[in-house]
Amino acid sequence: DSGVTQTPKHLITATGQRVTLRCSPRSGDLSVYWYQQSLDQGLQFLIQYYNGEERAKGNILERFSAQQFPDLHSELNLSSLELGDSALYFCASSPGGRATEAFFGQGTRLTVV
Amino acid sequence: AQTVTQSQPEMSVQEAETVTLSCTYDTSESDYYLFWYKQPPSRQMILVIRQEAYKQQNATENRFSVNFQKAAKSFSLKISDSQLGDAAMYFCAFYDYGGATNKLIFGTGTLLAVQP
């Protein structure tokens, strides 16, 4: 158990809908990272938050947004969902602002039908 | 841009034998970290081993060790005394310590099967 908790584990939704994925980092970790794992794109970095502030941005679509709350949990919001958004979404956390030691959650499997 | 290449999509090893997974990377930076992550069927991404580029000594974690060749930009993972529980997808990853992007860049993975 990495100590990073993601909910829900599975999510099935229809095209055009909006979903929210939740992540609780390891105790004491200030950074949260979101990654998308799909069959055709592999593991892609989406976005990082550090102590409530956006720190780095990757290949995140405009339809997607994230935030980190004062208690350091994070949410990834995906809207206007398309079939191609079906993927495994991982959250990872690290103590500081750099991903030199990142621990991953179990992921949320999103299926868009 | 940094890239990570894993040229072996699939590997197989007999239980108790040794297997080496290959990884090469491309970067112009001198300070960085390299990682091997394991993804078993449970989908959990598990950190197996980490290497800091400025350290010449190869990292070791129990049955897992790396062969880090900085000049060749090569970072292979050796698994000794393979066990059935080692069966998983293994990802090599690169982190640019001084970069602004602050992200892990993953290879495409190597699926390891362990034969009893």
Image (tube, rainbow, N blue to C red):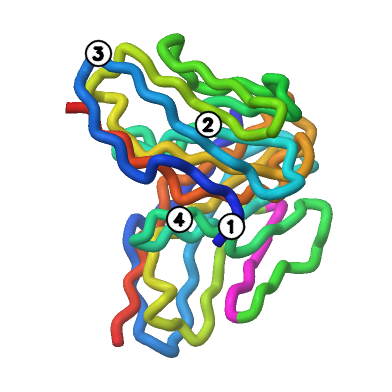
| Residue picked out by circle 1 | A2
Q: Secondary structure at mark 4?
A: loop
Q: Which residues are magenta?
A: B63-71
Label 2 and label 3 in one chain: yes
Q: Amino acid at mark 3?
A: Gly
Q: Nearer the viewer, mark 2 or mark 3?
A: 3
Q: Nearer the viewer, residue B103 or B58?
A: B103
Q: Earlier in the sequence, mark 2 or mark 3?
A: 3
Q: Using the numbered discs, state the Cα–Cα distance from disc 1 to disc 2 in whole angstroms.
A: 19 Å
Q: Using the numbered discs, state the Cα–Cα distance from disc 4 to disc 1 in whole angstroms.
A: 9 Å
Q: Nearer the viewer, residue A43 or B4?
A: A43
Please indicate whether residue B110 sits to the left or right of residue A98 in the image: left
x and y, in percent, of residue A81 in the image? 29, 18
Q: Which residue is painted at 34% across and 77% down in the image? A: B114
Q: Earlier in the sequence, mark 3 or mark 1?
A: 1
* Figure quadrant of residue A36: top left
| Residue picked out by circle 2 | A45
Label 1 and label 2 in one chain: yes
Q: Amino acid at mark 1?
A: Ser
Kindly identify which chain the residue marked by label 3 belongs to: A
